[in-house]
Image (tube, rainbow, N blue to C red):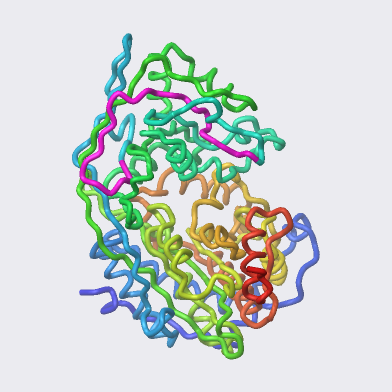
Amino acid sequence: MTATHYYRIVCSIGLAAALSFCSEQSTDGPEAIAQQPLQTDTITAPADALEAILHEHIAVLASDEFEGRAPATPGEELTVNYLREQFMKLGVAPGNGDSYFQPVEVTEITAAGAPEMIIQGSDYAASFSYGDQQVVGSQQQVPFVTVQGSDLVFVGYGIVAPERNWNDYANIDVTDKTVIILVNDPGYATQDPAVFNGNAMTYYGRWTYKYEEAARQGAAAAIIVHETGPAGYGWEVVNNSWTGPQIGLTAANLNGNRAEIEGWITQETAEAVFDGAGLSYTELKQAAAQPGFTAVPMADLKLNVSIENSVRTSLSQNVLAAIPGTTRPEETVIYTAHWDHLGIDPTLEGDQIYNGASDNATGTAGLLALAHLHAQAPAPERTVVFLAVTAEESGLLGSQWYAQHPVYPIASTVANINMDNMNTVGRTRDVVVVGARSSELEDYLADAAGRQGRYIQSEPNPERGYYYRSDHFNFAKVGVPALYAESGEDNVEFGRDYGAAQAQDYTDNRYHQPGDEYRASWDLSGAAEDLRLYFDIGQRLANEQTFPEWYEGNEFKAIRDASSARRLGSDPQ
């Protein structure tokens, strides 16, 4: 029995209710607003209806029947068909011509057994166990990969940033060598605002960048040292995410440009290896955070790893629906949420399904709820697109594919609004912008939040690099202003400490774990209120003529300026 046999749409929200929450924008600061009652009289009724819709969709998407929604599995087939059927029920048109789907070519790589990592030198030899002490794999889409006798080199944070006068690979050739890399960046290590972005992670701190740079440098293997603080998650997240089938975009060159081996080691493993080389991990970690750091060969230690892979190429699907614009249909506002999660791990004892209820059945349900709201509003002047992307958990692959193969021209894409892991613990007085001080979309957000009596708050954990960990980032990389905002921690009923504790409890105990399951007791009033924000912003964007811009100094502004020149016909090329 498919989910659609027992799913029931709960309610229908009229346009008057959809717009009834709006009131005069508050001009008070966060402290004053925190002392004021929120405007419950204007938002309770539509919020209740939105909550019911969210509960219904999340319960289905996060059910065991959907098997954790892994790409290229029966769980995907259930998921994408469910989304198509719901968009059809709402009367929202296909978003890719006459289809609701955009095929995404993916390759699944599964390592056989538990690959062993052996490190040897003249006075040292050790084998480290897969899962407990290390996780190694390969993104090369071939059946067998081996690295034998590869010299180990500690390259600090593995960063080449000319604009910051920083080069961890200066004066050393790591061709065919194994580089050992610290997670995050020197700003986090020093907590100095003048170093990179201080506590706020830059893209140089993300694991994706570190593997990319190691490959550019010609390394045979790239191994990142995990520490919970700078990574932003515990070892169990690494173990759960990087073991089992790994999905990547199908590459014509079979990813031959990637390092043969990519992996992680625990801090304890790193300390043992450094000690085996006669080096101090603690001292070298401190040195690596200072300007002028020089990479350190790790005595005569060498890496030996061989991996046998099963390789399976298939199609996954992005799901698109759209409400065509009436006067400027070529201009688009795109909402995004990823529908996928981690699937099933048959090696686990007990619960083997990663249901992904918070991450990201909530955002996917939110996408359907927004389609519901927009479908009842007057037809927009610009086209409004609802894009549920695949393979976010494998490295933002579905949104990367869309950005590289856009259904709607990037130059005329007005903005992206992304939803990932929505609030399940009640309303908040604050709204957090992930990657703040980036674009004029934050002004739109401030206006909409003010009408709800809420205030904008800085990201509580900028060191975790959330800006680089969800699908809006791929829109930003091609120049489209992208907003990723969510409920903060200032819980209306129980206060900030409660909100912070709930967020940390989720990170510690359910994030990327089988325990991320739907609970009927969830308080989705905060998620519903956030959806009103996104709807308000989307309505404004869809019915005005301006294009929001990146703020001066933003790294993506030049890309947007170039695409705007092409759109306006003023590009000299």
Q: From the viewer's perspective, is 121 left or right of 217? A: left
Q: Residue at x 36, y 81 (%)?
A: 99
Residue 180 lies, with reference to residue 79, above or below; the image says above
- The answer to whether residue 61 shows anywhere in this view is yes
Extreme-front residue of the structure: 573
**Residue at x 34%, y 80% (from the top left corner):** 85
In this view, the residue farthest toward the top is 123
Please count the marks in the image.
0
Would residue 13 appear left or right of 394 to someone viewing this image? Answer: right
Residue 351 seen from this side:
no
* Residue 55 place in picture, x, y as percent: 42, 69
Q: Nearer the viewer, residue 287 or 158?
A: 158
Q: Residue at x 68, y 81 (%)?
A: 544
Q: Quadrant of residue 315?
A: bottom left
Q: Position of residue 228 (x, y in %)?
A: 48, 35
Q: Which residues are magenta?
A: 138-162
